[in-house]
Image (cartoon, rainbow, N blue to C red):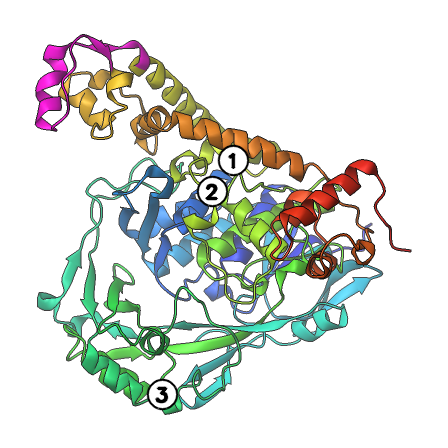
Amino acid sequence: MTKYDYDIIVVGGGHAGSEAASAAARMGAKTLLITMSLEAIGRMSCNPAIGGIGKGQIAREIDALGGLMGVATDESGLQFRMLNRSKGPAVWSPRAQCDRFMYAASIRRRLEAQPNLFMRSDMAVDLLVEGDRIDGVITQLGQTIRARAVILTSGTFMNGQIHIGDRSYGGGRMGEGASTGLTGALHRLGLESGRLKTGTPPRLDGRTMNYDVLEEQKGDETPVPFSYMTDKLPSKQLCCWLTWTNETVHDLLRTGFDKSPMFVGRIQGTGPRYCPSIEDKIDRFADKDRHQLFLEPEGWNTDEIYVNGFSTSLPENVQMQAIRMVPGLENVHMLRPGYAIEYDYFPPYQLRYSLETKAVRGLFFAGQINGTTGYEEAGAQGLIAGANAARYVHEEEPLILKRSQAYIGVLIDDLVAKGTDEPYRMFTSRAEHRMMLRQDNADERLTGLGHELGLVSDERLRRMERRHEARVSMAASVNGTSVTPEEVNPWLESLGCAPVKQTDRIAKIALRPEVSLSELLHQTGKEDLVETVEGLESVVDMVEIDLKYAGYIQRENELIAKMEQLESLRLPDNLDYAKLTNITMEAREKLERIRPENLGQASRISGVSPSDVSVLMVMMKSGKSPRKA
């Protein structure tokens, strides 16, 4: 008989907790998900959307590894758009508006159907530790539950404090209480914490908006699913709407600055740099006379509207007066005011790449507890933490995704190697190999690995293999098929392109910047070369990208090979950086605090110069590194 009730306990049922519990259970670990409210599992706390620039790539990667986010998005989608189509394919990013109620219901249904997974409505208030290893949790209801591994995914609930104007009260989300106890438990284990803040905008009654003066934004005519397991999306989509603030709105908002918790100093936590509140935007960008507001529907069966771009913690009466000065919202009814929330987080330099804490074996963190913001960033960490907790329980090596392998690898490396003192969100600009990490090839990059680990089903693997075969087959057909001048020149001349003088290969003509491969095949009557597969319908875009960016992709692969040499040089756990007098003092301090696992990670730490890395490399190759007593 074992003393353990479960292999793994996951604390928190948000996007990180849901993916963590699902991943651990899929890999055969008996898993308990503890959450304060079973009704809130998978809830979209902020905007009703999945994806966006950089985030859509992460959502695709979660799906490629068998996660829940993609299929739940497709089931609940209100509108689908591929962003950045006017730019290069490295930054094409899918985004979907979701019915927030259907999304949460889809997540809950899938968790309940997952073997090895159990749920409990309760709150973890303390941790059980035996030596240097986690041993379980103690709950608010007085239960001691033992497990080999624990994953904390507390979101904004850990000592959460809600601010609206001059009013503040404890809470992790509007209408839900804060969680207490775990911060103190983690401090006793030697972990350091900080405070961050985020915010959310007012919710409006869509029946009271004047749509005649709003700018309509429709979804794509041919929407692309998020999940590789989705064969077809509904044809019906809802519209979003655009409007703008103005100087009158800004002047009215300024009247509430003296009661703003951000400006009077009641909020100590750092807010998100790339998603500031409306009062922060007015203060920081005083030269701008207007800011865009994106009005997002929250569901098929509700008139509730999310006002993206108007996040605020100003007094409710100021919010109401200001928002009624916005064109189209003059007579609007506010369902709920915006608010700011401040919460505890633990700087992620205290983690290993597996998301296990360095201080306690078997204790993992995922989501906003690590200083990130966003559903996709949280879900990605949850999946990796869940998989690695299962690997830990089974005494196997952890799953570590490289920066050249996935946006998830970039995310975790940024957190662990650099830490963060403000809410971290993903952008395509953070990935140095983004041409290799496109949203369309996530399955080819990750699904095979996920299947080896037990995260991915046989059917998902077969779909990936069929899509890859279709891509290879179509590429061969395109390379082996030619067209005559008579077939192609009239169309080329209509594009302003030089005509061909003799029969030429389709693959060569498709290299021209003005030429779309799919349109070329259509104009020359070669549509039979297009290979179709489930889900994404065709692989023609992937074939075109491979053709047009072949040289760039080759150079990227060469750079990746060089970086992997650094990643292969592991740094000893007991290396005494204080004795390395031939590197800078700043480098010594940063290396001692973060204690990187390998030379690649060390090279990405702010304050560690290339010359410092060279010293470390010479030292490692000579085998003369100083050790701690």
Residue 334 appearing in the image? yes
Quick one: 130 or 118, which is closer to the camera? 130
Disc 2 to disc 3, how far (Cα)?
42 Å
Give the amino acid at mark 2: Glu
Q: Quadrant of the C terminus?
A: bottom right
Q: Which mark is residue 446?
A: 1
For disc 2, the marked residue is 61
Q: Which mark is residue 516?
A: none
Circle 3: is it few (<14), some (14-19), or many (20+) Cα within 10 Å? many
Q: Which sits earlier in the primary sequence, circle 1 or circle 2?
A: 2
Residue 222 percent across, percent down from the top left: 22, 39
Residue 480 percent across, percent down from the top left: 31, 9
Q: Residue at x 52, y 50 (%)?
A: 380
Q: Residue at x 68, y 46 (%)?
A: 613
Residue 233 shown left or right of residue 229 in the figure: left
Circle 1: is it few (<14), some (14-19), or many (20+) Cα within 10 Å? many
Question: What kind of element bears circle 3?
Answer: helix
Give the amino acid at mark 1: Leu
For disc 3, the marked residue is 257
Circles 1 and 2: CB atoms closer than 8 Å: yes
Residue 455 shown left or right of residue 581 in the figure: left
Quick one: 167 or 476, which is closer to the camera? 476
Q: Is residue 318 magenta?
A: no
Q: Which sits earlier in the primary sequence, circle 2 or circle 3?
A: 2
Quick one: 402 or 154, which is closer to the camera? 402
Question: What kind of element bears circle 2?
Answer: helix
Q: Which residues are the magenta region?
A: 479-505
Residue 63 shown left or right of residue 536 in the figure: right
Give the amino acid at mark 3: Phe
